[in-house]
Image (cartoon, helix red, strand yellow):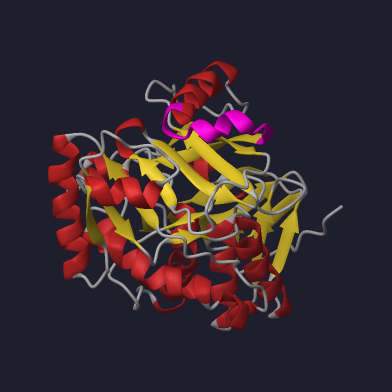
Amino acid sequence: MPTLPRAASVVIVGGGVMGASTAYHLAALGLTDLVLLEREAFFGLGATGRCAGGIRHQFATDINIRLSQLSLPMLDALEDTTGQPALVRKCGYLFALTREADEAQFRRNVARQRALGVPTEWLTGDEVRRRCAPARFPDALSGAYCAADGLADPNSVVMGYLNAARRLGATCLTGVTVTGLIVESGRLTAVDTDHGRLATPCVVNAAGPWSAPLAALAGLDLPVTPLRRQWLTTTPLPELPPDFPFIIDFARSLYFHREGQGLLTGMSNPDEAPGFDQRVDPAWELIHLEAALERLPLLERAGVAGRCAGLYEVTPDAHPLLGASPIAGFYLITGFSGHGFMHGPICGKLMAELLTTGRAATLDITSLALSRFAEGRALHADSVEYNVV
């Protein structure tokens, strides 16, 4: 049974990448009187542990591109920082485009990325077909590719940060469920759990898809919606070339990448109803596999090695909530809309800066404040920020 301290300067709720990164970066700045709480028996079993592990620079808004430019080098350096490698693999992300409307938007995206220093390449249809082989894209009009994009291992990143935070003196506990947040005169004063009360002036909501129910315990309505996404892995496919990229059939929200000797593939269901169901939908899996086989016929030679469903935490503008809330002492690091794993390193650092100095010094995050929705400042991202890993 975990031993819960009676008080802490900061309590972080959620043991995925956001919570782990925040804990480490706070401890690295000298604030070790902190407690990280995870309700599951092990860390990283929630949204982080069920993500596909993609890391990319290819986004449609400056703030997301900047977050990637800061975060991905931190994944490269994770072993130097924490002693645990992130197992980064730069296989490149390739968005295959089959609709003229998407071409126009992606041309704008690529121009924005290149203006900010991201080496994204614009590909012709023939170049897409060549780079995607043995996947078939006879209808590809064009594509966007960045060799600096790829994959990292979610569990390695979470445990790297958690173990380093513990070595620095942070308390990180599993098997503890938050049951209440005590707010007095508009200020947070304590956290109730199934193991007792913990007095604190500061709580960080890093609960991912469960961040809205957590905020509701403090009387705060948080615009974060859980949305199921699922994927599967295959048995070995020796025909896959070693340089097979992370391929996204953008029009279908269908994607593939190498996973070990086999393949990981997923496809977003546009009719998925919001909710907390993390069971694999077998009917949608059949639809997904039919589409996947059309693009990659050699899948007929493979079996299913594993399958998984997890939750995105979606905000109305597909951008995160990062910063303070209307409740004094209650901070938000959530709502990443499927892009959280790759931005976890930098966002934990930004949150640590905010909590220790009153401002995020590394990057201006005022555009990600919760208040943007009430003030009409929502980041109206183009649809390309949705439904891709």
Can residue 335 be seen here? The reply is no
- Locate residue 388, reporting x and y percent: 38, 42
The residue drawn where x is 69% and y is 44% is: 177
Q: Is residue 170 left or right of residue 299?
A: right
Q: Which quadrant of the view contains residue 25?
A: bottom right
Q: Is residue 283 left or right of residue 8?
A: left
When the figure is inspected, residue 172 is found, relative to residue 16, above or below; the finding is below
The residue drawn where x is 47% and y is 53% is: 244
Magenta segment includes 156: no
Q: Is residue 365 left or right of residue 354?
A: left
Residues 373 and 235: in front is 235
When the figure is inspected, residue 61 is found, relative to residue 381, above or below; the finding is below
The residue drawn where x is 39% and y is 67% is: 148
Magenta segment includes 302: yes
When the figure is inspected, residue 92 is found, relative to residue 102, above or below; the finding is below
- Locate residue 114, reporting x and y percent: 20, 67
The residue drawn where x is 63% and y is 26% is: 279
Can residue 164 be seen here? The reply is yes
When the figure is inspected, residue 80 is found, relative to residue 288, above or below; the finding is below
- Locate residue 126, reporting x and y percent: 25, 47
Total marks shown come to 0
- Locate residue 333, reporting x and y percent: 45, 56
Which residues make up the magenta segment? 294-306
Q: Is residue 72 left or right of residue 182?
A: left
Q: Which quadrant of the view contains residue 360?
A: bottom left
Residues 80 and 31: in front is 80
Residue farthest to the right? 1
